[in-house]
Image (tube, grey):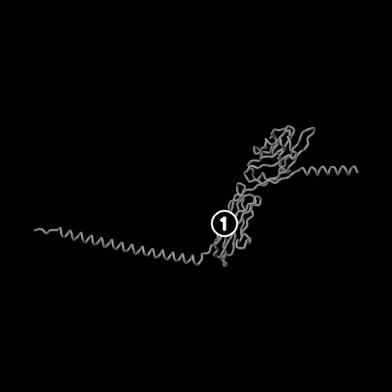
Amino acid sequence: VLHFSCGFLLLFLHSLRAVTTLEKMIVSKLGDNTKLSCIYPQGGKLHLENLRVYWQVDDPQEKCSVVYALISGQDNESEQCIHFKNRTQLLWDRLENGDFSLLLLNVSQSDARKYKCIVLQNTEYTKRVHHEEVVLSLAASYSQPILSGPIRNTNSSEEEVTFSCKSSNGYPKPNVYWINKTDNQHLNSSELKITLQTDGTYSVFSTLKIKATSNMQIECSIKNEILQENLSANYMEKEMSNSSNQESQKDLGQNRRGAQAISIVSVVILIALLVALACWLKKRRSSQLKSYKAPV
Protein backbone atom coordinates (compact mmCIF):
# COMPACT_ATOMS: atom_id res chain seq x y z
CA VAL A 1 0.00 0.00 0.00
CA LEU A 2 2.86 2.32 0.85
CA HIS A 3 4.50 1.61 -2.49
CA PHE A 4 1.23 2.41 -4.30
CA SER A 5 0.81 5.67 -2.35
CA CYS A 6 4.34 6.85 -3.17
CA GLY A 7 3.87 6.06 -6.84
CA PHE A 8 0.57 7.93 -6.90
CA LEU A 9 2.16 10.92 -5.16
CA LEU A 10 5.00 11.08 -7.72
CA LEU A 11 2.49 10.89 -10.56
CA PHE A 12 0.43 13.64 -8.95
CA LEU A 13 3.48 15.90 -8.56
CA HIS A 14 4.50 15.25 -12.15
CA SER A 15 1.02 16.28 -13.26
CA LEU A 16 1.26 19.52 -11.31
CA ARG A 17 4.60 20.24 -12.95
CA ALA A 18 3.12 19.70 -16.38
CA VAL A 19 0.26 22.07 -15.61
CA THR A 20 2.62 24.89 -14.64
CA THR A 21 4.45 24.64 -17.99
CA LEU A 22 2.75 27.06 -20.38
CA GLU A 23 3.30 27.22 -24.13
CA LYS A 24 2.50 30.22 -26.30
CA MET A 25 2.61 30.88 -30.04
CA ILE A 26 4.07 34.15 -31.32
CA VAL A 27 4.32 35.37 -34.93
CA SER A 28 6.82 38.06 -35.89
CA LYS A 29 7.83 39.62 -39.18
CA LEU A 30 11.41 39.36 -40.37
CA GLY A 31 13.57 42.25 -39.16
CA ASP A 32 11.11 43.30 -36.45
CA ASN A 33 11.66 43.35 -32.69
CA THR A 34 9.46 40.83 -30.92
CA LYS A 35 8.57 40.11 -27.30
CA LEU A 36 8.75 36.58 -25.93
CA SER A 37 6.26 36.56 -23.08
CA CYS A 38 7.07 35.11 -19.64
CA ILE A 39 4.95 36.31 -16.70
CA TYR A 40 4.98 34.85 -13.19
CA PRO A 41 1.29 34.25 -12.43
CA GLN A 42 1.48 34.77 -8.65
CA GLY A 43 2.12 38.51 -8.95
CA GLY A 44 3.31 40.66 -6.06
CA LYS A 45 6.75 42.14 -5.46
CA LEU A 46 9.70 39.81 -6.07
CA HIS A 47 13.21 40.11 -4.69
CA LEU A 48 15.46 39.98 -7.74
CA GLU A 49 18.55 39.21 -5.67
CA ASN A 50 16.99 35.83 -4.85
CA LEU A 51 16.06 34.96 -8.44
CA ARG A 52 17.73 33.42 -11.45
CA VAL A 53 16.00 33.81 -14.82
CA TYR A 54 17.09 31.79 -17.85
CA TRP A 55 15.92 32.06 -21.43
CA GLN A 56 17.03 29.04 -23.44
CA VAL A 57 16.53 27.44 -26.84
CA ASP A 58 14.46 24.32 -26.35
CA ASP A 59 16.49 22.06 -28.65
CA PRO A 60 18.75 19.29 -27.31
CA GLN A 61 20.70 19.29 -30.59
CA GLU A 62 21.94 22.85 -30.04
CA LYS A 63 25.53 23.12 -28.81
CA CYS A 64 24.74 26.51 -27.24
CA SER A 65 21.27 27.02 -25.82
CA VAL A 66 21.54 30.10 -23.56
CA VAL A 67 19.62 33.06 -24.98
CA TYR A 68 19.74 35.25 -21.88
CA ALA A 69 20.54 34.89 -18.18
CA LEU A 70 19.67 37.13 -15.23
CA ILE A 71 21.34 36.16 -11.95
CA SER A 72 20.64 38.04 -8.72
CA GLY A 73 19.32 41.03 -10.66
CA GLN A 74 22.34 41.29 -12.99
CA ASP A 75 22.95 40.36 -16.64
CA ASN A 76 25.19 37.36 -17.07
CA GLU A 77 26.65 37.07 -20.56
CA SER A 78 29.32 34.49 -19.80
CA GLU A 79 27.37 31.59 -21.33
CA GLN A 80 25.18 33.52 -23.80
CA CYS A 81 25.21 32.17 -27.36
CA ILE A 82 27.03 34.47 -29.77
CA HIS A 83 23.96 34.51 -32.06
CA PHE A 84 22.04 36.41 -29.37
CA LYS A 85 24.78 38.84 -28.31
CA ASN A 86 23.49 42.44 -28.16
CA ARG A 87 20.06 41.29 -29.37
CA THR A 88 18.25 40.59 -26.11
CA GLN A 89 16.97 42.64 -23.21
CA LEU A 90 14.46 42.39 -20.38
CA LEU A 91 11.81 44.93 -19.43
CA TRP A 92 13.62 46.18 -16.35
CA ASP A 93 10.78 48.28 -14.97
CA ARG A 94 8.51 45.20 -14.86
CA LEU A 95 10.83 42.60 -13.35
CA GLU A 96 9.80 43.10 -9.73
CA ASN A 97 6.17 42.53 -10.74
CA GLY A 98 7.02 39.15 -12.23
CA ASP A 99 7.23 40.10 -15.91
CA PHE A 100 10.31 38.32 -17.28
CA SER A 101 9.43 38.77 -20.95
CA LEU A 102 12.40 38.93 -23.31
CA LEU A 103 12.73 41.46 -26.14
CA LEU A 104 14.45 39.88 -29.14
CA LEU A 105 15.81 42.40 -31.65
CA ASN A 106 15.99 42.16 -35.45
CA VAL A 107 14.63 38.64 -35.76
CA SER A 108 15.80 36.38 -38.61
CA GLN A 109 14.92 32.93 -39.95
CA SER A 110 17.30 31.23 -37.52
CA ASP A 111 15.28 32.64 -34.59
CA ALA A 112 12.21 30.60 -35.56
CA ARG A 113 12.19 27.92 -32.84
CA LYS A 114 10.90 27.01 -29.39
CA TYR A 115 12.19 28.90 -26.36
CA LYS A 116 11.77 28.24 -22.67
CA CYS A 117 11.77 30.68 -19.77
CA ILE A 118 12.83 29.23 -16.41
CA VAL A 119 12.61 31.18 -13.15
CA LEU A 120 14.47 29.79 -10.14
CA GLN A 121 14.24 31.08 -6.58
CA ASN A 122 17.09 30.81 -4.09
CA THR A 123 15.94 30.52 -0.48
CA GLU A 124 16.97 27.60 1.73
CA TYR A 125 17.35 25.63 -1.49
CA THR A 126 16.93 26.38 -5.20
CA LYS A 127 13.49 25.67 -6.58
CA ARG A 128 11.80 26.33 -9.88
CA VAL A 129 8.88 28.70 -9.41
CA HIS A 130 7.90 29.29 -13.04
CA HIS A 131 8.36 27.75 -16.49
CA GLU A 132 7.00 28.89 -19.83
CA GLU A 133 7.57 27.80 -23.41
CA VAL A 134 7.25 30.11 -26.40
CA VAL A 135 7.17 29.03 -30.05
CA LEU A 136 8.31 31.80 -32.38
CA SER A 137 7.20 31.69 -36.01
CA LEU A 138 8.45 34.19 -38.57
CA ALA A 139 6.74 35.66 -41.60
CA ALA A 140 7.09 38.40 -44.20
CA SER A 141 4.41 39.91 -46.42
CA TYR A 142 4.58 39.15 -50.14
CA SER A 143 4.58 41.97 -52.66
CA GLN A 144 1.42 42.75 -54.60
CA PRO A 145 1.28 40.07 -57.32
CA ILE A 146 1.75 41.13 -60.95
CA LEU A 147 -0.47 39.33 -63.44
CA SER A 148 0.63 39.30 -67.10
CA GLY A 149 -1.16 38.00 -70.18
CA PRO A 150 -2.91 36.61 -71.96
CA ILE A 151 -0.23 35.51 -74.42
CA ARG A 152 -1.81 33.65 -77.31
CA ASN A 153 -0.13 30.41 -78.35
CA THR A 154 -0.54 30.45 -82.13
CA ASN A 155 0.63 26.85 -82.46
CA SER A 156 -2.31 25.61 -80.39
CA SER A 157 -5.25 24.23 -82.33
CA GLU A 158 -7.64 25.19 -79.53
CA GLU A 159 -6.33 28.76 -79.25
CA GLU A 160 -4.65 28.32 -75.87
CA VAL A 161 -3.53 31.38 -73.90
CA THR A 162 -0.96 31.74 -71.13
CA PHE A 163 -1.09 33.92 -68.01
CA SER A 164 1.83 34.50 -65.64
CA CYS A 165 1.84 35.72 -62.04
CA LYS A 166 4.78 36.75 -59.85
CA SER A 167 5.40 38.05 -56.34
CA SER A 168 8.42 38.32 -54.02
CA ASN A 169 9.94 39.19 -50.61
CA GLY A 170 7.65 36.89 -48.63
CA TYR A 171 8.12 34.22 -45.97
CA PRO A 172 7.40 31.35 -45.57
CA LYS A 173 6.56 29.63 -48.87
CA PRO A 174 3.12 30.75 -50.07
CA ASN A 175 0.09 28.98 -51.47
CA VAL A 176 -0.69 30.04 -55.05
CA TYR A 177 -4.22 29.84 -56.46
CA TRP A 178 -5.59 30.44 -59.97
CA ILE A 179 -9.32 31.14 -60.05
CA ASN A 180 -11.80 31.49 -62.90
CA LYS A 181 -13.91 34.37 -61.58
CA THR A 182 -16.84 33.63 -63.92
CA ASP A 183 -17.72 30.56 -61.82
CA ASN A 184 -15.13 30.78 -58.96
CA GLN A 185 -13.59 27.51 -60.08
CA HIS A 186 -10.01 26.78 -59.01
CA LEU A 187 -7.63 26.10 -61.90
CA ASN A 188 -4.44 24.03 -61.90
CA SER A 189 -1.28 26.01 -62.55
CA SER A 190 0.90 24.92 -65.45
CA GLU A 191 4.11 25.90 -63.69
CA LEU A 192 5.00 26.88 -60.13
CA LYS A 193 8.49 28.03 -59.19
CA ILE A 194 9.35 29.19 -55.65
CA THR A 195 12.89 30.54 -55.23
CA LEU A 196 14.83 31.31 -52.05
CA GLN A 197 16.39 34.78 -52.32
CA THR A 198 19.66 35.98 -50.81
CA ASP A 199 17.87 37.82 -47.97
CA GLY A 200 16.11 34.63 -46.87
CA THR A 201 12.70 35.49 -48.33
CA TYR A 202 10.99 33.75 -51.25
CA SER A 203 9.93 34.81 -54.72
CA VAL A 204 7.19 32.95 -56.59
CA PHE A 205 6.42 32.61 -60.30
CA SER A 206 3.46 30.71 -61.69
CA THR A 207 1.87 30.25 -65.11
CA LEU A 208 -1.58 29.19 -66.23
CA LYS A 209 -2.48 27.80 -69.66
CA ILE A 210 -6.15 27.66 -70.55
CA LYS A 211 -8.39 27.61 -73.60
CA ALA A 212 -9.32 31.14 -74.64
CA THR A 213 -12.95 32.21 -74.20
CA SER A 214 -14.90 35.28 -75.22
CA ASN A 215 -15.17 36.56 -71.65
CA MET A 216 -12.14 35.59 -69.59
CA GLN A 217 -11.96 36.66 -65.92
CA ILE A 218 -8.84 35.25 -64.25
CA GLU A 219 -7.48 35.84 -60.74
CA CYS A 220 -4.06 34.97 -59.32
CA SER A 221 -3.98 34.76 -55.52
CA ILE A 222 -0.87 34.59 -53.25
CA LYS A 223 -1.68 33.47 -49.69
CA ASN A 224 0.61 33.67 -46.64
CA GLU A 225 -0.88 31.17 -44.19
CA ILE A 226 0.95 32.41 -41.07
CA LEU A 227 0.00 36.07 -41.55
CA GLN A 228 -3.40 35.14 -43.02
CA GLU A 229 -2.70 37.56 -45.88
CA ASN A 230 -4.26 36.95 -49.27
CA LEU A 231 -3.09 39.19 -52.12
CA SER A 232 -4.61 38.93 -55.59
CA ALA A 233 -4.37 40.32 -59.12
CA ASN A 234 -7.18 40.15 -61.69
CA TYR A 235 -7.58 40.10 -65.46
CA MET A 236 -10.92 40.84 -67.14
CA GLU A 237 -11.34 40.78 -70.92
CA LYS A 238 -13.63 43.52 -72.21
CA GLU A 239 -15.48 42.92 -75.45
CA MET A 240 -16.19 45.88 -77.71
CA SER A 241 -19.92 46.17 -78.44
CA ASN A 242 -21.42 46.80 -81.92
CA SER A 243 -22.49 50.28 -80.90
CA SER A 244 -18.97 51.16 -79.86
CA ASN A 245 -17.69 49.72 -83.15
CA GLN A 246 -20.16 51.87 -85.05
CA GLU A 247 -19.14 54.93 -83.05
CA SER A 248 -15.50 54.20 -83.77
CA GLN A 249 -16.23 53.84 -87.48
CA LYS A 250 -18.27 57.04 -87.39
CA ASP A 251 -15.43 58.89 -85.70
CA LEU A 252 -13.02 57.48 -88.26
CA GLY A 253 -15.24 58.69 -91.14
CA GLN A 254 -15.53 62.14 -89.59
CA ASN A 255 -11.76 62.31 -89.21
CA ARG A 256 -11.29 61.37 -92.86
CA ARG A 257 -13.81 64.00 -94.05
CA GLY A 258 -12.12 66.59 -91.86
CA ALA A 259 -8.75 65.73 -93.37
CA GLN A 260 -10.19 66.01 -96.90
CA ALA A 261 -11.69 69.43 -96.11
CA ILE A 262 -8.38 70.68 -94.79
CA SER A 263 -6.63 69.46 -97.94
CA ILE A 264 -9.14 71.28 -100.21
CA VAL A 265 -8.80 74.53 -98.25
CA SER A 266 -5.03 74.30 -98.45
CA VAL A 267 -5.13 73.85 -102.23
CA VAL A 268 -7.50 76.83 -102.64
CA ILE A 269 -5.25 79.04 -100.53
CA LEU A 270 -2.21 77.98 -102.55
CA ILE A 271 -3.96 78.76 -105.87
CA ALA A 272 -5.02 82.18 -104.53
CA LEU A 273 -1.43 82.95 -103.53
CA LEU A 274 -0.15 81.94 -106.97
CA VAL A 275 -2.78 84.13 -108.73
CA ALA A 276 -1.92 87.10 -106.52
CA LEU A 277 1.78 86.63 -107.24
CA ALA A 278 1.15 86.47 -111.01
CA CYS A 279 -0.92 89.69 -110.92
CA TRP A 280 1.74 91.48 -108.92
CA LEU A 281 4.48 90.46 -111.39
CA LYS A 282 2.36 91.54 -114.37
CA LYS A 283 1.63 94.94 -112.81
CA ARG A 284 5.27 95.55 -112.00
CA ARG A 285 6.36 94.73 -115.56
CA SER A 286 3.75 97.11 -116.99
CA SER A 287 4.95 100.01 -114.84
CA GLN A 288 8.55 99.41 -115.90
CA LEU A 289 7.59 99.65 -119.62
CA LYS A 290 5.82 102.97 -119.11
CA SER A 291 8.80 104.53 -117.37
CA TYR A 292 11.17 103.52 -120.18
CA LYS A 293 11.91 106.31 -122.77
CA ALA A 294 13.48 105.68 -126.17
CA PRO A 295 16.63 107.80 -127.13
CA VAL A 296 16.12 110.86 -129.49
Q: Residue at x 31, y 63 (%)?
A: 268
Q: State which quadrant residue 104 falls in.
A: top right
Q: Is residue 147 toward the left or the right of residue 1 in the image?
A: left
Q: Amino acid at mark 1?
A: Leu
Relative to 83, residue 176 above or below: below
Q: Which residue is mark 1?
A: 147
Q: Secondary structure at mark 1?
A: strand
> Looking at the figure, which quarter contains the N terminus?
top right
Residue 231 position within the rendered picture, expressed as x and y whole percent measured from the top left: 60, 53
Where is the C terminus found, in terms of image quarters? bottom left
224 is higher (above) or lower (below) than 31: below
Q: Single out the residue that lies furthest toward the right.
A: 1
The vertical placement of 204 against 239, above or below, is: above
- Residue 91: name its quadrant: top right
Q: Residue at x 79, y 34 (%)?
A: 125
| Residue 214 percent across, percent down from the top left | 56, 65
